[in-house]
Image: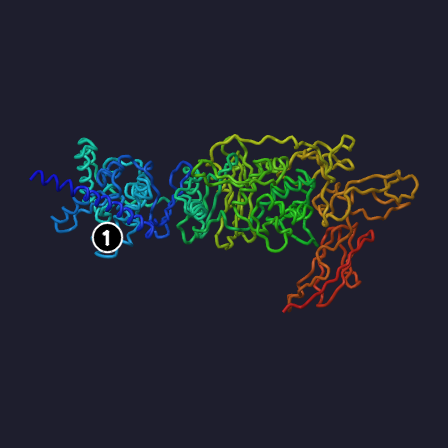
Amino acid sequence: MSYIRSVVLSFIAPFFFSFIMVSVVYSLFFFLVLDRLFPLFLENRPISTVVTASDGTPLRAFADERGIWRYPASIDQVSPLYIQALLNYEDRWFYYHPGFNPLSVIRAAIQNSRAGRVVSGGSTLTMQVARIFFINDFNIQENGKGLRVKLLQLFRALQLELHFTKKEILNLYLTHAPFGSNIEGIKTAAYTWLGKDALELSHAEAALLAVLPQAPSYYRPDRHPERAKNARDKVLDRLEKIKVWSAATVADAKREPVVALRFTPPVIAPLAARRLHFQDAGESLIRTTLDFDLQVHIEEIVKNYVSSMPAQSGAALVVDCKSMEVMVYVGSADFTSIERKGHVDMIQAIRSPGSTLKPFLYGAAIDDGLIHSHSLLLDTPRFNAAYEPENFTGEFMGPVTVTEALRHSLNVPAVQVLEAYGPHHFHDRLKNGGATLEFQGRPNLSIILGGAGTNLESLVTLYTAFVRDGVASKAVMKIDSTSGRDEKSENSRYLLSPGAAWVIKDILTQPFPGYEGIDQLAGHVPVAWKTGTSYGFRDAWAVGIMGEYIAGVWVGRPDGTPVPGQYGAVTALPLLKRIVDSLPQSDFCKKMPDSVKKETICWPLGNAFKPHMSHCGSTRSIPTSSHSFKPHMSHCGVNCLKKYEAWIVEGKVPVTLIDKTSGKGSLLKTMWVNSRGERAQPSCNGVKMISVALWPESVDAWLPSEWKNRNRIPPPSPDCPDLASFSSGALQIASVGDESVILCPPGEDAESSSIPLTTIGGWGKIHWFLNRESVATSHKNGTVILPMPKPGRYQLVAADDSGESDMVMFSVISGR
């Protein structure tokens, strides 16, 4: 029999093994054909996004488009304890099997047969990944169970093993495994259920999360902690049994209670996070430059500050100008407030900037040689001008320096400088410097008083020029995830020369009466600051520079509703002070450029003082509280009535600007005088030529008597008089425009109404004529009242004692 058995085996064995080999080859061929016919296509599932501060602390998280919280995870981002628990409990032979474990399948079949129901699935981690990604293929019968489902799951598992490495398959599981509710992936589960990173898991926590995907809802730890504990302990027992963890370790782990509270994602810097999330859609981790502690602190400052202001919001942006990184981004006062429209990012919102652009106008005018730090400007009414603004206070200060005009944020002098510089030129300069500007139509003079739209981010970008030698640079807010460095781009633009930038910052740093509290805060570096208020009290702004830090704030209502009484110095400046006081101490200070020098200059001409000029007393620095122009001596020199120590750039000392409200021509007048000092005609005997510096006519009312032009020009000689007008410009009617239309009130109100008559320029008394009939006489720059004439067309003439005259036509119509 043994002989017969051996003969039979020797005859059958080759055929049997041949059959096995052929079956394997055909199966492999069949599998490869099926792999081509039904290719493995893993759905590119969207991922959740976490935005962090510079130190990695989470600021805000975003679920995917279906509301699933899923963060990509890899083996090196997960605690080794979890990997041990997962593999030894779920799939001990993961690194050795081809996608399925035959022994596990056989064991599961026996257990299910004995129990009469499914008690074990025998699935490997690879098969579980296949089920996660191809669940729609499996849910075709018996609620996703049964032989056909298992065969499909096995086929997809083999495909996964064919096309992916073991590490890649494990990473897919770590990212997509279900953990209950809308939680997927080990990193999301660790933070949601345990409030910690997946790298920081304890033995007990690792065991709990290893078993949770088996029945996420049934074992959900926040709802069923006892079930979760029993399942966890089962994992711990298995790991002890196979000697992965010691008995002592398991015993300690079992004593650890299951305490799970669903942690909600943080909401810090929500609008900054939202902005970066939309900007970099698809990135799972966005690391910002924000300082976490400073961000939280300033968010609280802004929220508390506006809490007593109904429906108002606030925004703050802080930039480190050394690194050009955004340190703080507070887009609204309260992100969750519906009343304050907290979802609106007021750092990016286009608003009227008020007076915040004035420093750049004065800096540009210095660069173009139009002014220096103490040039004479006119803070006087602008009659008959294309644009007639008033100051915020409604008052005028007369002749002022550039320093005073900027420090007091005077509107009229700024318009005078812009008129000389050119609105279109200024607009282009700001745009070339990187500013965001929205303007309807062609740029005009209103741009300097808030007539163009911009945002807080753009303003802070422009103000970096005062710290970076005139170069405006846009700060970055994101750190590259691979290099760990700031994602910098070519966002630096030339705006001002280093000299002009230094001079303007020096002006903004000078103490201002009533606001000493912000002039010097942290450290020993003075704070340079500027405020702004939009038309109608809709926006209050303040920007401050302290060392290398720039902070900008906005306060107002996001819907643009006016808030009477709200303006920059009262509403925004106190908030800026609190923010600047919270910044790290800094002793950073820019050195004065070599292009900046001190020069003694003279008013009213604005030129440099020379020793041969007549003496006019001691020099003065910037006046801060008084504007009474009292001479230092009773008899001042001819051409240097007032001296200042001014900053000049590149050696340029421009003379005083002349605009139409000052009259035409130079302020330096040439005339001939006789031996008695009387003004005479050039043809008279014994005359000599002299030059006299005159003031712009519009400042006459602010001058002391001895400085007024009428007292500086020699009287005419009775023998050979020179009757020429030496006003700085022709006589002009200021209060009534040519071809203007005046509305006469109806009824009895017409009897009490009137027309003010005012001129600019002229000499002596002003004589008024209406339709060639004399109606009034006034003094130069004085005002008389003309009773309202009847409806009709009129000719109005003003003539001075020297014969100069001006004429306008106007109409009076009846009001109804």
The N terminus, quarter of image: top left
Residue at 35% x, 53% y is 66
* Position of residue 208 measured from the top left corner of the image (x, y, whole percent): 23, 41
Q: 765 left or right of 265? A: right
| Residue 333 can be seen, yes or no | no
In the picture provided, is 108 more to the left or to the right than 725? left
Q: Which residue, as the protein is rendered here, is positioned at the far left? A: 1
Residue 527: x and y, percent?
Answer: 54, 36
Q: Is residue 526 visible?
A: yes
Q: Quadrant of residue 617?
A: top right
Amino acid type indicated by mark 1: Val
The one nearer the camera, 294 or 617, is 294
In-image side of 48 versus 509 (left or right): left
Image location (x, y in percent) of residue 381 = 67, 50
Instruction: Residue at 64% x, 42% y: name it.
Output: 362
Q: Foreground: 40 or 374?
A: 40
In the image, residue 44 above or below residue 294: below
